[in-house]
Amino acid sequence: MDVDTLKFSTLRQEIEAYVRGPAAQMGQVIEETGQVSQDVWDDLQRRGYLRLAAPTEYGGLGLPFTQYLDLLGIFAHMHGSMRVIVHVLNGLWRSVDKMATQAQRQEFVIPFVHGEKRITFTLTEPNSGSGTDIKTVARREGDEYVLNGEKWMIIFSDITDYFLLFCRLEGTVGSSGTLALLIPRDAPGLTIQMMPPAMGITGTNHGHLLLKDCRVPVQNRLGEEGEGLEVAFAGFLDPSRIAIGMTCVGAAERALELSILHAKQRVTFGKPLADRQTIQMWLAEMATDIEAARQLVMHAGRVFESGRPSASSASMAKLFGTEMLQRVTDKALQIHGGIGYFKGEMERIYRDARMQRFEEGTSETQKMTIARGLLKGF
């Protein structure tokens, strides 16, 4: 059930003011210092922005997925690192909660929603593709699993309390034998090496995890043996891909806003850029691209909300959204001309936008998912 229209409208206006005011100032500090301070996390948590979609019984606001998507598009006008925090924290509870026991719900899910424990998604490996190709293995010894392998490009590795890590039982292939395990950052046998700063999303750190006979209690397993990838994909990746599509819409909207303002202010040969037909055509193409992506994302959101989630719909939303963002930011930088290449908001959006192309799977991965869905229908 949707949140009361008036309450939702008030929340939406509050977030719009936050994004244009305090969040914009925080974004400038992040770019200047290269760090996302604890104050940023605390402020987002205090305002309730990291538990928008979580159930009210867990301490969340209980927003339906489509209402959350609407707000996420506004948040995506912010600095990329702040957008990532809002996106990940509002979605990861689903993955942990999907197959959690009541005891695990009390120990992990509810503290996560309240901001008392941090968990990060841990799938990608340096020597494999994501999904059924995972090579990190585990063997069971009594009440523990012993893990060996590597993970990398793991976001929030410097501050997380637990890694929601996906691996497989020794000797298994494909989805058979996959596991979802919550690994404490101080687990014996786990070494965390921080990776170099990324091109964009300044201040958000990623880690390279080395697991050598790393031990974790069996009670930290979510679901049964063989259900690891179901926890990963149905619990987090599908809704997260839809959400990424909406973050692309929001970032593209901000790039369009900046382009319109620049086109009106910048005068060459005696008239504003906005009076030139080529610029007008670009702005029209950008606006149309953004609206098409918004409608596709919201359609995928309604499909997910219906209780009949579709991996194809999620991948379409993510694929089109990320490709759209590249087209829009490229035109936006062209409209800005040389000044857009210098450090500033437009330049930052251009850098940040590149991450979404491979976040939760590359465009090629999305195409493969869509193709499989099509071929199964015939």
Image (cartoon, rainbow, N blue to C red):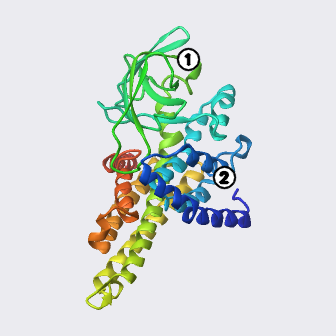
Q: Is residue 66 above or below residue 207?
A: below
Q: Observer-nearest residue: 200 or 169?
A: 200
- Nearer to us in this view, 28 or 115: 28
Q: Where is residue 109 in the image (x, y as percent from the top left)?
A: 63, 35
Kind of element beneath mark 1: helix
Residue 36 coordinates in the image, percent (x, y): 49, 46
* In this view, the mark in front (2 or 1): 2
Q: Report the residue at 52% width, 33% height from top.
A: 160
Position of residue 251 relative to residue 237, above or below, is below
Q: Label 2, secondary structure: give it.
A: loop
Residue on which disc 2 sits = 47
Question: Quick check: can you spot residue 217?
Answer: yes
Instruction: Return the residue found at the far front.
Output: 33
Label 1 neighbourhood size at 10 Å, few (<14), some (14-19), many (20+)?
some
The quarter of the picture where residue 249 lies is bottom left
Crowd around label 2: few <14 · some 14–19 · many ≥20 (10 Å): few
Going from N to C along the chain, the mark reached first, 2 or 1, is: 2
- Seen at 59% across and 48% down, the residue is 307
* Tag of residue 55: none
Numbered tag placed on residue 218 in the rendering: 1
Q: What residue type is labelled 2?
A: Arg
Q: x, y percentage for residue 347?
A: 35, 62
The answer to whether 25 appears left or right of 368 in the picture is: right
Q: Position of residue 26 (x, y in %)?
A: 52, 55
